[in-house]
Image: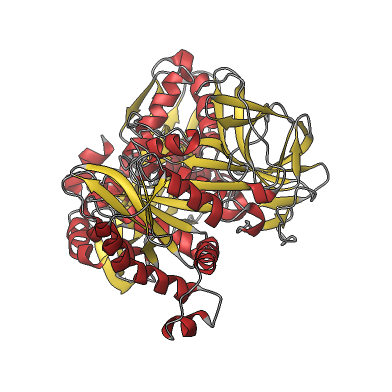
Amino acid sequence: MNRNAATFTAPASTAEIRSVVLVGPQGTGKSALIEQLATGQLGHVKEAEEASTQLGVVTAHHEATNTAVTLVDTPGRPDFVGDVRAGLRAADAVLFVVAAGSGIDEATRMLWRECAAVGIPRAVAVTQLELARADWDQVVAECGRVFGEAVPIGLPVLDGQHLTGVLDLLEQVGHDASGEQRALTEEESARVEEHRGSLIEAIIETSEDEGLLDRYLSGEELELDGLRADLRTAVATARFFPIVPVNPPTGVGVPALMDLIVHAFPSPDRAWLPTVMTRDGAPADALAADPDGPLVAQVIRTTTDPYVGRLSLVRIFSGTLRADDRLHVSGHLEWVVGHEVEGRPGHDVDDERLGQLTSPVPGGMAQRDSAIAGELVLVTKLTSAETSDTLTAAGDNRVVEPWLLPEPLLPVAISAAATKDEDKLAGALQRLISEDLTLRLDRNAETHQLVVWTMGPAQVDDVLARLQEAHHVEVTTEPVRTSMRETFVRPVQVQGRLVKQSGGHGQYAVVQLEIEPRERGAGFEFGDKVVGGAVPRNYIPSVEKGLRTQLAEGVLAGYPCVDVRVTLVDGKAHSVDSSDMAFQNAAAQALREAANESTVSLLEPVDLIEVTVADEFVGAVMADLRGRRAQVQGTAPADLEGHTIVRAEVPQHELSRYPIDLRSVSHGSGSFTREFVRYDYLPASLARDLTG
């Protein structure tokens, strides 16, 4: 983006602010649509590739109403759903971009349901109507089935494979390619008359005017101004969801869409606001989008800019944010997920000085002295602020609840390509974790791997690219190793003997042990049956200590040994050469000598997973699970209509690529959760593959 200074007309009140986030799959034309909406200069623009992995933001000025319209662009790939949800927090309304002929994918359906749960206003923009496979009536029917009260407010005018205009059903006028209003032709009037009744009936059904239906049924001609007002109110309160045809590359239909955004989407003082709490976790007073109120803002996204350094995208919910303000920064992600998050510890920082305040506008960045409630701005030099953190005035103890966080379930093991980059890698990963809530870092002490948990392969590629390009760290990846366990599978008796003499005091200890397997999860148990003082009582704790140390290190393949009972039954000591260390070493030696492929087996971790999937793909999911050595526990209806929950216990090793494979086998309709349940015996045929 051009970072030169640009002009900007600041809103004088929240009534002059609109913010909308555009969502939809990659390739639907979101980026091109935002460019047309932002510039207001209709004409052919290059179709964007929409391969962005982060939020894009631009604020345009709508001159006719003196309204600042902030447009938030979101990644189209499902791996970046975390940025989509951040975009939902940043905006007050959602524009779903649907490509005609491509259908509505499962990710879009799920996102619509999430929006419905919180009651955020929505509209649908239909693109790619000029393609041969596109069918307007078909896509409208699908929107109605999937989205509910989604009704067209305009009809496309097609000339062969070109969208040349839009017919306004309510106003009964046409809009040409430049957005200019014109009269309808006779044929167009017939089309409008055919569909206008359905629109008016939908407006009546969602109207707050209880007498409107009676007047309509009695044949009374309803006033256009009243219908227009009812439509806009229903859209703003998420009771009606308009469908509009647009062509992002040429801008056809964009003026009507911008009119809808400005007149029907809510201003911040009429929009849904997030929950706030005090720093001790207690509920706080609800927010109000009042520029004169106390300052409460939230960091929506943090990035590192090569020119200005740390850059924070901030949504102001209450009060006024001023350049050079001194702020309190508060972040407590652990309140939401219920545990401390690696790389994201709870923190409170007083007296953080605000840097430059800018608005991203067409053509560059507009310098700001202040910004009011409802605005979305960029802030520099917030060194302690991380994504989802709350910004308040000093002494204010309120914290904005973070948005819904998806669980990263695809792991990748990363290591520095060169020893000199190891320290840089640790710092770079911490920076990425602080910027992106959907990344999780796991330093596995057993496998000695640094594991980054992600949402999918596209995010893995993005992480690797950012490490190299932004942080100049070369890394290598490798398969994630499974943390195994060992256990004894049959009773065994063994002697551990340590007899050494090399001048001075020697080392002498002999122990006779009985080793028995225990039930899974029973742990280690030590006992002794020594009689006659064969092993002095003061050395028996030394035997136990040596056993515990060796069990922790492993007895056969280097994995911790669990669920075993060891009994000291006999032994020998020397009055001079015996010692605490000698008996520790003798006990450890006995365990190692007792361990072989006939006495010790490997245990693999097993997770309980719950897969939520569309009913039509349940059979495919269960067949896939059986191929992963899963024990299917059963199925149950999901809370989501048309979906089923499949419960199964699956070895962790079989889940390393499950997020990718589930997306394929369920056609994107599946999601899952996982939690560790136990260790279980690893089949001998797989032991060599999994242990390397």
Q: Nearer the viewer, residue 50 or 674?
A: 50
Question: How are the colours assigned in the image?
Answer: secondary structure
Q: Identify the residue at horizontal 49%, vertical 36% (top origin).
A: 38
Tell me if residue 480 can be seen: no
For residue 617, which quarter of the picture? bottom left
- Left or right: residue 664 versus residue 125 is left
Question: Relative to 336, does residue 198 appear above or below in the rendering?
Answer: below
> What x and y, as percent, mark residue 625?
22, 57
Front-most of residues 230 and 686: 230
Q: Position of residue 663 (x, y in %)?
A: 27, 50
Decide if residue 427 is in sight here.
Answer: yes
Q: Position of residue 546 (x, y in %)?
A: 49, 41
Number of on-image labels? 0
The structure residue drawn at horizontal position 44% and vertical position 34%, both measured from the top left corner, is 35
Residue 527: % across, % down: 48, 57
Image position of 587 (left or right of 157): right
As displayed, is residue 97 above or below residue 146? above
> What residue occupies the far right of the structure in this picture?
395
**Looking at the rendering, in which quadrant would you find the C terminus?**
top left
Q: Residue at x 61, y 33 (%)?
A: 312
Q: Up-down: is 117 above or below 686?
A: below
Q: Nearer the viewer, residue 436 or 493?
A: 436
Of residue 283 and residue 507, the one placed in the foreground of this image is: 283
Q: Residue at the location (48% across, 33% down)?
A: 39
Rendered image quadrant of residue 26: top left
Relative placement, left or right, of 211 versus 482 is right
